[in-house]
């Protein structure tokens, strides 16, 4: 199996969607967020930013360079409806995502800044805290989790921040008893996502299984080695893992899980 160089983690980002413009003054949002998360307001770095909030409790040092994690707020501005519409098919945890998205007109972006040197769990917990604070202050209609390519219900997300860690996607191979299923989201934290190509298994069961493996990787780190086996869907089974380039975009290193006979299928491709 091929082993591409590990990708650099991407910035964590989310987009709050509204049916109407938020009642809060956009210029006041950085100060409001800073109060909620013990942050410090800093000057905007780019022209499209509403403001920047630094997080003094989340410091890092790499090769003698020191930094402080921050969050940028971008907008509010008109919704990128077509872009977020591509995520509807991957948003099984928000059944009415398409209808609710169609009612939204305004978006507010939330982007992690200078936080990528932090450990994955610290990055996620800080970002989830920021998103949760903004949900409480602004009551958006929907949340777009950009790294996981998913539209989420804010009420449900408030009770389960792990929904921002990973999402499970599915692709059926036309003309074959073959399904490609993967997780997306862990790569943004510098961890491998999970992938499986299979037939003859219930999609819901595999989706739950891959999500559990993804959460294990999130909680324990990049500890599943190339060639190692992990327990399969049934107790006592052993499914082998290997490092490969993902079949689905974005291209990244994933843990490919081989369920063995009779469920394994050839990976589609040239």
Image (cartoon, helix red, strand yellow):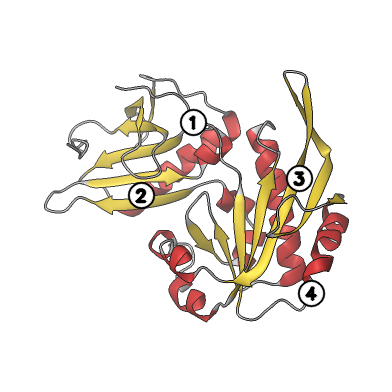
Residue 233 appears in the picture as rendered: no
Closer to the camera in the image, 98 or 74:
74
- Which residue sits at x=41%, y=58%? 90
Q: Earlier in the sequence, mark 2 or mark 1?
A: 1
Marks 2 and 3, how far apart at CA: 38 Å
Q: Image point 68% across, 60% down: which residue?
A: 48
Q: Looking at the image, which is closer to me, 222 or 44?
A: 44
Tell me the CA gap for discs 2 and 4.
43 Å
Give the quarter of the image for residue 29. Answer: bottom right
The furthest residue to the left: 175
Please give the residue where the numbered disc 1 appears in the rendered image.
Answer: 7
Residue 232 higher or lower than 185, as above or below:
above
Label annotation for residue 205: 2
Measured in 3D between alpha carbons, the distance from the residue under mark 2 to the one under mark 1, in whole angstroms, is 29 Å
Residue 197 place in picture, x, y as percent: 26, 40
Please give the residue where the numbered disc 4 appears in the rendered image. 24
Numbered disc 3: secondary structure: strand
Which badge, 3 or 4, comes first in the chain's sequence? 4
Confirm or deny contact between disc 3 and disc 4 (CB under 8 A).
no
Question: Mark number for residue 70?
Answer: 3
Q: Position of residue 71 (x, y in %)?
A: 73, 50
- Indicate the secondary structure of the residue bearing disc 4: loop
């Amino acid at each position: 199996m091929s082993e591409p160089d590990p990708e650099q983690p991407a910035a964590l980002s989310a987009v709050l969607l509204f049916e109407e413009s938020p009642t809060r003054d956009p210029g006041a949002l950085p100060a409001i967020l800073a109060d909620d998360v013990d942050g410090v307001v800093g000057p905007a770095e780019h022209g499209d930013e509403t403001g920047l909030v630094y997080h003094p409790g989340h410091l890092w040092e790499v090769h003698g360079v020191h930094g402080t994690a921050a969050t940028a707020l971008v907008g509010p501005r008109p919704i990128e409806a077509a872009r977020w519409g591509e995520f509807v098919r991957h948003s099984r945890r928000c059944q009415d995502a398409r209808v609710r998205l169609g009612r939204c007109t305004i978006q507010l972006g939330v982007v992690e800044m200078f936080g990528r040197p932090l450990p994955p769990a610290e990055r996620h917990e800080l970002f989830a805290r920021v998103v949760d604070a903004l949900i409480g202050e602004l009551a958006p209609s929907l949340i777009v989790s950009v790294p996981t390519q998913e539209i989420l219900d804010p009420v449900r997300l408030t009770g389960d921040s792990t929904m921002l860690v990973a999402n499970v996607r599915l692709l059926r191979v036309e003309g074959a008893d073959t399904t490609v299923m993967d997780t997306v989201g862990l790569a943004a934290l510098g961890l491998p996502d999970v992938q499986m190509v299979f037939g003859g298994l219930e999609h819901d069961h595999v989706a739950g299984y891959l999500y559990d493996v993804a959460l294990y990787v999130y909680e324990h780190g990049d500890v599943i080695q190339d060639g190692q086996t992990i327990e399969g869907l049934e107790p006592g089974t052993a499914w082998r893992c290997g490092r490969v380039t993902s079949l689905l975009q974005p291209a990244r290193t994933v843990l490919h899980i081989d369920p063995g006979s009779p469920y394994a299928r050839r990976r589609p491709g040239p």
